Amino acid sequence: MSAVHPEPVFAGGGSGSETAAGARAGAGTGPVSGTRPLDFALPPPREAHEPPEARGLRRDGVRLMVSRRDTGEVSHHVFSDLPSVLSPGDLLVVNNSATLPAAVRLDRLAVHFSGPLPSGEWLVELRRRTGNTTEPYSGTAPGEWLPLPGGATLRLAGQETPRLWRAALDRDVHSYLRAHGVPIRYGYVGRDWPLPDYQTVFGVEPGSAEMPSAGRPFTADLVTALVSRGVAVAPVTLHTGVASPEKDEPPYPEWFSVPPPTARMVNLTRANGGRVVAVGTTVVRALETAALGRHEIRDDSGAHDGQGGQGGQGGQSGDGPVRAASGWTSHVVTPASGVRAVDGLVTGLHEPRSSHLLMLSAVAGRDLLSRSYESALREGYLWHEFGDVHLIL
């Protein structure tokens, strides 16, 4: 354990009797023990404060921790080792959403544009500017109008969650953000970085409020090496909203698309004994929604209308095929819902109590995930969008 954190502090972990085999069974066939995300202490030195290129590394030079369900082994690599870790016949499913400059700064406030709603409104977060960073701001009310740079006006329609508002801009949002927005940045990143630093090599469909960061370490050369080894790559789209650091915050819809060729490749890979490895929690959400045959539409009143298929929040009934699908998903992957479509996950290291850790528990099992995070803290891995990477197989 590093000198800054001599003892890992974990709470709410899985049962000590949960074996590696039990974790595999939980990830593949039904619920696993534990319903709360991992809780642990994250020391500030473990936060990545700038892109790896600013630390003298290539994008694919960040560290890679590999956690294996079959053996329970946790091993340490660099990300450029990924072709040797995966096998011919595996499939990487990537998110081709590109990052928007989604933050608009006023004198004392910042508006973070999270994403559109089926109604045509946008979800936005209001944050108070405090020196070099921002914090959530709650001093507004429904019906208020905010004057934005460039003569634009934002009308607040009502609260969608304790932190997010439904709002309408008086002009096209994407065009406005290209002219007046900057990438969203939180306090652990000490300065602004240009938009290209927040793009992945796969990003061709603008729409994400924050970078689908699991894809950031990939380079064109690394993708070539993966394909040369016999690892296929297929895209989905899921436009990410703003990060959700508040615990117990209800989910909100995000737009996704799983195209027919990708659905076919996922099903063929699994039928032929290969592994489907999602690059990012966004890809898991899209594929699992498509495997359920269900995408949830939220109408103007905020009600949900489950569209098509069966499934839902219960346990698994077996591995179902992935079908081409697009729409608005509010599906949340947890140990109780399990996973149907993915066999592995490339992801960053997530904050304590983050809802993403429930998804990781569904893929890895609670015991393996807890041991992996203890190892990451002990070995000095870096967290957040510019940090190191975790591969669960």
Image (spheres, grey):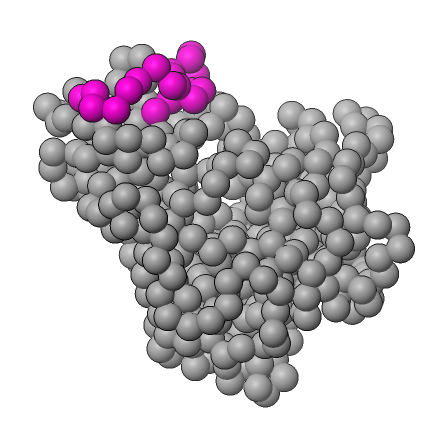
Residue 136 in magenta?
A: yes
| Residue that appears at 64% across and 57% down | 336
Residue 337 in magenta?
A: no
| Residue that appears at 59% across and 87% down | 272
| Residue that appears at 62% across and 65% down | 315
Q: Is residue 218 left or right of residue 371?
A: left
Residue 132 in percent (x, y) is at 43, 16
Q: Quadrant of residue 176?
A: top left
Say above or below: 132 vs 158.
above
Q: Is residue 193 left or right of residue 147?
A: right
Q: Residue furthest right?
A: 17
Q: Quadrant of residue 145?
A: top left
Q: Is residue 172 left or right of residue 17?
A: left
State the residue in front, 160 or 283. Answer: 160
Judge whether residue 226 can be spotted in this image.
Answer: no
Q: Is residue 64 left or right of residue 235?
A: right
Residue 365 in percent (x, y) is at 73, 57
Residue 190 in percent (x, y) is at 48, 23
User: Which stretch did the figure color magenta?
Assistant: 126-145
State the residue in front, 120 or 243. Answer: 120
Residue 265 in percent (x, y) is at 46, 80
The N terminus lies in quadrant: top right
Say above or below: 135 vs 370.
above
The C terminus lies in quadrant: bottom right
